Image (cartoon, rainbow, N blue to C red):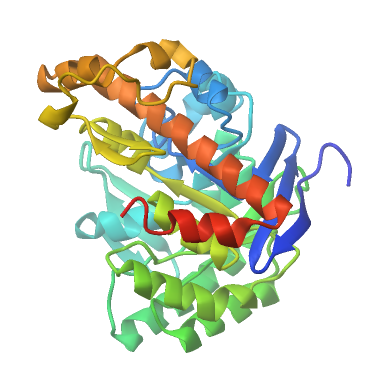
């Protein structure tokens, strides 16, 4: 592998849990990895430099939202999102497929065209075709590009799920053609099929036939129970190529991540650390802490005595409780930063335990710790 090419190395396995490393021209990513979500070019409430200090090696941006604002012309002037937001490490971009589901009242799907959106900002008509999605992601200068897919809402209707597979497979082929032969970047396929093993297998097989640099499980973390999600991962993750990264999109809580790693997943993203931070919820080695709770009003201890970023270990739970109750914006900034730091420490411990062959013990200790 050349230094200017994308690659993935599977270093070792501990049962199904995998330790690996993704290499890109903009840096390496140790897996299992968690990607903070920077939908619009910012991880909400956190300075870019501080994200780097948490040990984060890759962040996520969003094609649909960045297409609307600031738009590809501005991004092209900066040669992409990295320079625009002052982030010099890898970026993965969601293709806009999630917005097809989440903004379903503002778009219509046409297999031959793509998704036709009515902008949630100004009502302007936007056509997001598979080709357009790849073009926008290249303007963003993403290091890992996702195919455009139809992400179905939670349903047990096989006809709806089969249609989504048909559309997504067709779009995946078109994305592959538009992506071309750029070896410095990666193109990931996205499997659909809901909670049905046979549909997931059908979708995965179609994607493998097209051949991608990595594979994602889409259409999960959309309202199903954790046990349902783990069941379908157990049944189907092993069908994905062993020598390529496996990505579970939009997940999740620390226990979601732990269970998915147990079933062989390598990559994760979720807005939960910062969204929770904005409501006063902190993830710690003590478990989940609702800092608004009155029991923290006189607590002099910090959330994590080892975290020196922005002097976080100097702020007491009592002070954070005061900030949250006073509706001060610094509360969400500090707790969000702490949560990203915790998530990266959590991933580091997962990797360490896989390497040492002790992941099963770590899994049993923490599997229900954050529920």
Q: Would residue 244 be found to the left or right of residue 271 on screen?
A: right
Q: Would residue 101 be found to the left or right of residue 322 on screen?
A: right
Question: How many discs mark residues in the rendered view?
Answer: 0
Q: Nearer the viewer, residue 252 or 3?
A: 252
Q: Would residue 256 be found to the left or right of residue 207 on screen?
A: left
Where is residue 358? Give x, y as percent.
65, 56
Q: Would residue 82 be found to the left or right of residue 296 on screen?
A: right
In the rendered image of this protein, does residue 360 appear above or below residue 286?
A: below
The reply to whether residue 167 is visible in this rendering is no
Q: Nearer the viewer, residue 190 or 164?
A: 190
- Residue drawn 15% across and 21% down? 297
Where is residue 221? Give x, y as percent.
35, 61
User: Image quadrant of residue 312?
Assistant: top left
User: Image quadrant of residue 45?
Assistant: top left
- Residue drawn 42% across and 50% down? 254
Where is residue 46? Give x, y as percent.
40, 22
- Residue drawn 44% across and 53% down? 366
In the rendered image of this protein, does residue 251 appear above or below residue 280?
A: below
């Amino acid at each position: 592998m050349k230094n200017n090419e994308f690659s993935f190395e599977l270093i070792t396995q501990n049962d199904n849990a995998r330790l690996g490393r993704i290499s890109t021209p903009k840096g390496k990513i140790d897996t299992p990895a968690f990607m903070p979500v920077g939908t619009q070019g910012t991880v909400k409430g956190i300075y870019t430099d501080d994200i780097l200090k948490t040990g984060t090696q890759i962040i996520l941006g969003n094609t649909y939202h960045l297409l609307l604002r600031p738009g590809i012309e501005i991004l092209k002037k900066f040669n992409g999102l990295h320079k625009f937001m002052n982030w010099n490490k890898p970026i993965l971009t969601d293709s806009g497929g999630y917005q097809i589901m989440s903004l379903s009242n503002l778009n219509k799907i046409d297999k031959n065209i793509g998704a036709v959106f009515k902008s949630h900002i100004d009502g302007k008509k936007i056509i997001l075709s598979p080709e357009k999605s790849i073009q926008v992601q290249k303007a963003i200068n993403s290091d890992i590009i996702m195919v455009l897919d139809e992400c179905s809402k939670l349903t047990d209707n096989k006809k709806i799920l089969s249609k989504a597979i048909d559309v997504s497979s067709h779009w995946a082929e078109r994305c592959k053609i538009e992506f071309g032969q750029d070896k410095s970047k990666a193109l990931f396929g996205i499997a659909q099929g809901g909670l049905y093993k046979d549909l997931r297998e059908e979708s995965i097989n179609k994607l493998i036939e097209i051949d991608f640099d990595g594979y994602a499980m889409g259409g999960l973390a959309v309202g199903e129970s954790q046990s349902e999600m783990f069941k379908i991962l157990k049944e189907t993750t092993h069908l994905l190529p062993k020598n390529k990264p496996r990505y579970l999109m939009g997940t999740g809580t620390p226990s979601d991540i732990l269970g998915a790693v147990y079933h062989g997943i390598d990559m994760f993203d979720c807005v939960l650390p910062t969204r929770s931070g904005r409501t006063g919820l902190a993830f710690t080695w003590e478990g989940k802490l609702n800092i608004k709770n009155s029991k923290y009003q006189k607590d002099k201890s910090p959330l994590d005595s080892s975290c020196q970023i922005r002097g976080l270990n100097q702020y007491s739970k009592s002070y954070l409780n005061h900030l949250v109750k006073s509706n001060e914006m610094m509360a969400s900034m500090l707790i969000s930063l702490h949560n990203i730091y915790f998530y990266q420490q959590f991933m580091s411990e997962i990797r360490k335990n896989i390497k040492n062959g002790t992941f099963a013990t770590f899994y049993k200790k923490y599997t229900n710790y954050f529920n």
